[in-house]
Amino acid sequence: MGAIISTLSEIVSSEKFESVEPENVEEQYTKQGQLTIITMHKAKGLDWDYVFLPFLHENLIPGRFWVPPQGQFLGNFTLPEVARAQIRAGLHKKTIPDINQAWEESKYLKTAEEYRLLYVAMTRAKKLLWMSADKKAPFIWSKPDNLQISDPCPVFTALKHQFSQ
């Protein structure tokens, strides 16, 4: 452990990090007349007159759980997610779940987090919120020409039901 900490300290001290101005962080994203393109993760605590949320497909929000073939040597789960769920249970003094229970819990927690992020993004708009999902979307964004039929985020169905009453 001592060797690891020493190596990490050496890496950190050798890097040239830019200083962060904590009192002006929001200003760079919310300047008047500026178009800001950021992820939903960065939007917390900020707001704009107009917010556009394109590409809201089910495979992104809430997302699909997929274990790559090279990661299936242990089973049909991802080890980091299972470990996080087990560590979380241990920290909260709960019974540590077995692999299958931990995997199911991690899927639930990831889905909940994605919906929380979407909620934060949706509530950043002061005047207009525009959300969209096309009938086709890239399977992966590094190959945007490879379009496949894609379902919209389930939020659209919920919103349609809510406003049709």
Image (cartoon, rainbow, N blue to C red):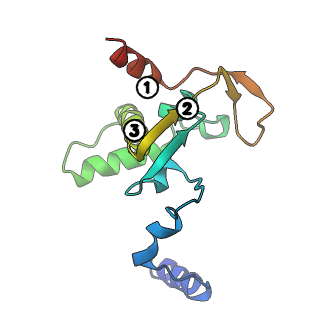
Determine whether 144 is above or below 44 in the image: above
User: Alpha-carbon neighbours of circle 2 within 10 Å: few (<14), some, or many (≥20)?
Assistant: many
Q: Which residue corresponds to mark 1?
A: 155
Residue pushed farthest top?
165
- The residue that appears at 69% across and 31% down in the rendered structure is 139
Q: Are marks 1 and 2 in contact (CB under 8 Å)?
A: yes
Residue 141 position within the rendered picture, expressed as x and y whole percent measured from the top left: 71, 40
Give the CA distance from mark 1 to mark 3. Answer: 21 Å
Residue 128 position within the rendered picture, expressed as x and y whole percent measured from the top left: 46, 39
Q: Which residue corresponds to mark 2?
A: 56
Marked residue nearer the N-terminal end (1 or 2): 2
Mark 3 belongs to which amino acid?
Ser
Q: Nearer the viewer, mark 1 or mark 3?
A: 1
Residue 81, by quadrant, is top left
User: Alpha-carbon neighbours of circle 3 within 10 Å: few (<14), some, or many (≥20)?
Assistant: many
Q: Nearer the viewer, residue 56 or 162?
A: 162
Mark 1 belongs to which amino acid?
Val
Which disc number belongs to residue 106?
Answer: 3
